[in-house]
Amino acid sequence: MAKRNKRLQPRFFIFLLITVALLIAIGFLIKMIIESIADRIAGEMLALPAATEVPLDPENLLPGGSGVFDVETLPPLPTGTDYYISADADALPAKFGFTGEVRINNSTEQYNSNPRAGSLRFGQANSYTSVPGILTFGSNHYRNSFSYGNPHVSTNTISYKWEYRIGSLGEFSGTSWTGQALIVEWPPEVRAVSGIDARYKNAEKPLHEVIYPAADGNIYFMELTTGQQTRAPITVGVPLLGTGSIDPRGWPMLYVGGGMQMKNDRGNEAAYIYAVDLIQNKVVDTFVGKDYFANRDDWCAFDASPLIIDDTILFAGESGIYYTTKLNTVFDPAEGKISITQGDRIKFRYQGQGYAKTSREGARWYGFEASPTVFRNFVYLADNGGRLLCLDINTLRLQFVTDLGGDTDASPVLEEDGNNNTAYIYTVNQVQTSSSELPEGYGYASVKKIDALTGRIVWDSPQAVYVGDGKIKSGSRATPHVGRGNISDLVIVTYYQAGVVQRDGEGNESYAVGGRIVAYNKDDGAIVWSIDQNGEADYMSSPLVIYSSRGKAYLVCCDRAGYVKLYDPQYGGPPLCNPIALGARIDSTPVAFESYIIIGTTGKGGTPRIVGIKIE
């Protein structure tokens, strides 16, 4: 029986066509959805910053406007209360034979505590001033930043913008150690009466004035971006080796110390803190001079940068005395006048076992070259004898003494740690003593992390340095940078005459002498990275770290071969761009306001000058 062929009905073809059309439509729809999602994801990825470029939170800026505060700060105390010190057993003042004495002015009457009425309490670092700029060494009383603002950095380069040539005074020229410039954006009412050039008084845009006390005995003034002179130099006539301080209220008064003793009108060798009226552009008062209360007989100078709080100036001298004086400042913008009237000079001196009244070989020396650092009601003073003194500002009683291991000129840097309910001090020293663990002529300097409320050394990381026959002092005079932002786990230190390890083809180690940049882990002091330089390219100036508008850190180091180099401090490694040669030795610490970097050079090796550089 033959099979019968089936005929396909027309409605089947209609159903098939509809099904195919639906499948094609669904396919196009899916494709459009996928492409839309892909485009959106790609757009979002393009909009995202790089992993190390986290945008800043404008509500959570660091002191001086430099980056994000990654560190937990301590909670504020109730009004009228103070923190207290519980000295570690190894930091008790009696262990080092330390005692202290307090006097007023030139009185011979001894006080057991501070005779000044009232009390002084500093806040967190960002409370030191509300004026844009860098108004003291390290920006504030924590001494933790040499930069202000967060520039946009796109090419990772530095470029030379301007120079201002300066002179010499005797054996000194240019700018010296610490020699940091000050930069200030004057409030409009101050700018209107200040002694600046008329073209800057009422300009529409703000004036960012660079103020640079120099080793040639002059104070120089220039506009930040052009280097053009904003007022004539003020001649003080003595080498100004340290860093000055502007009244943190933004008032037009500058305080700067003389770095060398000079004959005064009585024929005595003396040094002074100079008060400079920036309306009249002249020195209007001096502080101290020859002080017979000093335990050090042979030297007095003022390299340390003063601090000002509640119209009271705090400063320390190389004679080994710490001073506070009420300023009684009167500033009348309407009249265009500013004046000070010094109150009682309250002073503290210390005595310690092994110290001598003169800087003779083999003895510890009295004196403070490091700038005082303050946490709330405590001041921290690193001395030439290799000790860290913690002093209560309001009682002038010693709280603890920590052994730093050698002469410490680098200013202590303070960091709060709310997670551990304390604060820490970071210091680095110099040394003249050889170590039996190292080749002949080498000794150990070290960077230390110290609990600021107990004096306990948390960690101590040694660095080999060249000391020769014991008459050469080596190590670091550079203030450490305590990192934040994308380097919040690091502490960066620069050394001079470091012992740089070299290895021959057979792996044998030997030491050469040169500069070294070292990044330490904050938690344990382990070396994260280091960069070695040749013998001429070592460091007196402190490391400058700039935090970009996206939170990335950039490290600027200036060496004594005259080069300015830009690094990525997160990883170390080679410079990010070609270095800039300034043609003369750099001992001074650079500072930055937004994208402009200000650096001073000595006259050694070339013409002394002040230079403006830009990070781009």
Image (spheres, rainbow, N blue to C red):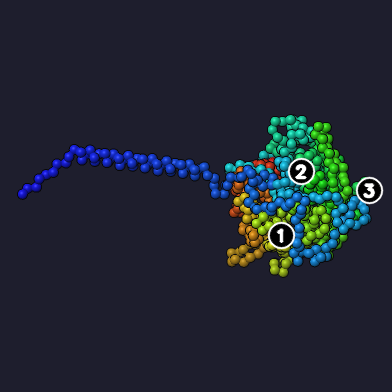
Find residue 120 and name its label.
none
Report the side of 473 relative to 525 (left or right): right
Q: Position of residue 112 (x, y in %)?
A: 87, 58
What type is the residue that disc 3 sits on?
A: Arg
Contact check, label 2 and label 3, Cβ < 8 Å = no
In this rendering, is residue 34 above or below 107? Answer: above
Q: What is the quadrant of the C terminus in the image?
A: top right
The residue identified by callout 2 is 248
Residue at 83% across / 56% down in the picture?
Answer: 396
The residue identified by callout 1 is 451
Q: CA distance from mark 3 to mark 1?
A: 45 Å
Within 10 Å of disc 1 (Cα), the crowding (few <14, some 14-19, many 20+) is many
The residue lying furthest to the bottom in this view is 436
Task: Depth check: give the residue in front, 90 or 296.
Answer: 90
What type is the residue that disc 1 sits on?
A: Asp
Within 10 Å of disc 2 (Cα), the crowding (few <14, some 14-19, many 20+) is many
Task: Depth check: give the residue in front, 98 or 493.
Answer: 98
In this rendering, is residue 415 above or below 153? Answer: below
The residue identified by callout 3 is 266
In this rendering, is residue 524 above or below 16? Answer: below
Contact check, label 2 and label 1, Cβ < 8 Å = no
Report the side of 147 relative to 176 (left or right): left
Q: CA distance from mark 2 to mark 3?
A: 34 Å
What type is the residue that disc 2 sits on?
A: Pro
Residue at 18% across / 38% down in the picture?
Answer: 10
